[in-house]
Amino acid sequence: MPLPPVSEPSNIKRVGSERLVRIDGVNGIFTPIGSTAELPIGADERANLQAVIDALKQELSSVQSEKQQAEQQLSQLRDRPSAPDDFASAVQQSLDELQGRMATMRNAMSNFAVREFKLEASVFVQVSALGNIEYRFVQPGDQIEPAALSKLTLDVVPVPKSNLAGVWSSELFQPELALGGLPGLTDVQLKRLEGAGLFSVGEFLQVGTRARAQVTLQALLGAERQQLQRWAQQAALMCLRGVNGAAALVLIEAGFGNFELLAGHAPETVARGYARVRAAHKDWGAPLAGIAWARQWVRAARQYLGLPEDAAAAGT
């Protein structure tokens, strides 16, 4: 990372002749501020060195001030009250994760599912200038007036869906697939995601598509937003049963990079496109996928989008 430019001290004294120099292919003027190593340090040279030191101290003070302001702004953002959509998204993600894990728990008599969800927590409540109630969950060490504290209680009771739109049904989807299969994800990044509580492609997809969470993921992974979007796209396709990281890359390259595109084509078209791109990129190591897999992927995409499963577009 290059250092910021330091302004030239105004009280520099010329102790030698200026001359033209060339550094890294760029011409410039060199102004001596000291004598050669063989000569003793003179009064002018000492004054110049002190002027440089003073200028560096001033720049350091400016950088420290900017850092302090940035830390204060970051603290304000962290302490910002939660918006209803943020809270709703967090509850949705928690419920989806809980239901997904319980769906894999079975014994000889029954399967398991979330029937009721209850949450009770202390929150700091305030009314905004627009008259909206804002709240923030109390963190350890927070100093908040007791009169400003309130209790947030939430009871979630499931209502059966009329169709399977938006549902990760186990016979067609695999949102529990481990995150390690995401193309381009390093071991360090994987450990950071696991440390943040993300272990599967389904969990990453839920977080990676939320605008405010994307900022946290960018800082956590040291990745650009475009890379996060690519990972989210790949994670969505990897939620289809039978699709791994390499198969997701093939589907994207073949023009079937999301559920809408898959749902809009006939299985035969998907199978041909997949086979063509797989043959062109054998080094990706994508698995074979014939017409049976293509039918299942199209069916899954249409079911998730709430479209009739038996009316796939003919495609070309």
Image (cartoon, rainbow, N blue to C red):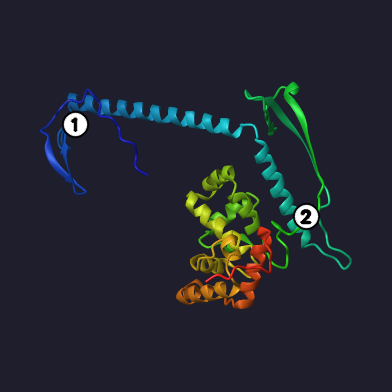
Viewer-side residue, 280 vs 186: 280
Q: Are marks 1 and 2 in contact (CB under 8 Å)?
A: no
State whether residue 196 is above or below residue 200.
above
Q: Position of residue 228 (x, y in %)?
A: 52, 52
Count of marks, rendered view: 2
Three-letter code for the amino acid on which mark 1 is drawn: Ile
Crowding near pointer 2: few (<14 within 10 Å), some, many (20+)?
few
At 64% from the left edge and 65% from the top edge, which residue is drawn? Answer: 240
Location of residue 299 (image quadrant): bottom right
Give the labeled residue for mark 2: 161
Comparing labels 1 and 2, the label whose residue is closer to the camera: 2
Q: Which mark is residue 33?
A: 1
Q: Earlier in the sequence, mark 1 or mark 2?
A: 1
Q: SS at mark 1? A: loop
Q: Position of residue 22 (x, y in %)?
A: 16, 45
**In the displayed structure, does residue 264 sit left or right of residue 223?**
right
State whether residue 93 is above or below residue 80.
below
Q: Quadrant of the N terminus?
A: top left
Viewer-side residue, 288 vs 11: 288
Q: Position of residue 33 (x, y in %)?
A: 19, 31
Q: Is residue 177 visible?
A: no
Three-letter code for the amino acid on which mark 2 is drawn: Lys
Q: Residue furthest right?
A: 109
Crowding near pointer 1: few (<14 within 10 Å), some, many (20+)?
some
State whether residue 240 is above or below residue 192.
below
Q: Position of residue 94 (x, y in %)?
A: 72, 49
Q: Is residue 299 visible?
A: yes
Q: CA distance from mark 1 to mark 2?
A: 79 Å
Q: SS at mark 2? A: loop
**In the displayed structure, does residue 241 sit left or right of residue 288?**
right
Location of residue 5 (image quadrant): top left
**In the displayed structure, does residue 13 sit left or right of residue 153?**
left
